[in-house]
Amino acid sequence: MSKKLINPKELFDSSVFGYSQAVIETETGLLFISGQVDWNQQYEITEKSVEGQLRRALSNLKVALETAESSVDQLLHVRIYIRGELGEYMNTIAPIVSEFLGESRPAITGIGVASLASPETLVEIEAVASVK
């Protein structure tokens, strides 16, 4: 197995935490994207709402995809973590996610959780995509 590390300069420096923003397994062409949150390059939240953080996390996901020479159309699986009860946010997040994904239609899992990367973090998104 060989891998290629992906760390877009537009995203925060994840190396201080010991991981990469994404990794390509070069033999299979699978791209594994670490959980994307609404952090700027100083590890600060920029949005206060679930909707705002979701949009920012999706934007960061797109940066990781494009840096790895992949795209939203090549997403295979997306996992969305929401702080709190997921069902309370479905009507809010579904249109945003649908707009972002377009016709891609990857497998999706939504999970309500008690905590995320920081006390202010409300949304985190991780994904698997193809680069081939």
Image (spheres, rainbow, N blue to C red):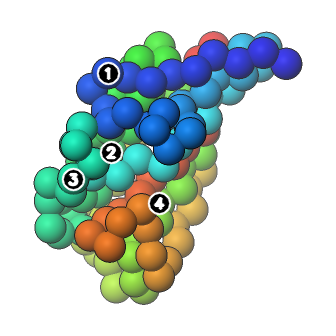
Q: Earlier in the sequence, mark 3 or mark 1?
A: 1
Q: Earlier in the sequence, mark 2 or mark 1?
A: 1
**Label for residue 9?**
1
Q: Give the residue at mark 3.
A: 44
Element at label 1: loop
Question: How far apart in space, not on screen, are marks 1 and 4 (Cα)?
Answer: 23 Å
Q: Which residue occupies 45% across, 24% down? A: 7
**Label for residue 58?**
2
Q: Which residue occupies 39% across, 76% down? A: 83
Q: Which residue occupies 41% across, 47% down? A: 36
Question: How far apart in space, not on screen, are marks 3 and 1 (Cα)?
Answer: 16 Å
Q: Nearer the viewer, residue 100 or 126?
A: 126
* Crowding at mark 3 (Cα within 10 Å: few <14, some 14-19, many 20+): some
Element at label 2: helix
Task: Using residue 41 as the reference point, say whether residue 8 is left or right of it.
Answer: right
Q: Earlier in the sequence, mark 2 or mark 4?
A: 2
Q: Are marks 2 and 4 in contact (CB under 8 Å)?
A: no
Q: Please name the amino acid that badge 1 sits on.
A: Lys
Q: Please name the amino acid that badge 4 sits on.
A: Ile
Q: Residue furthest front?
A: 16
**Label for residue 80?**
4
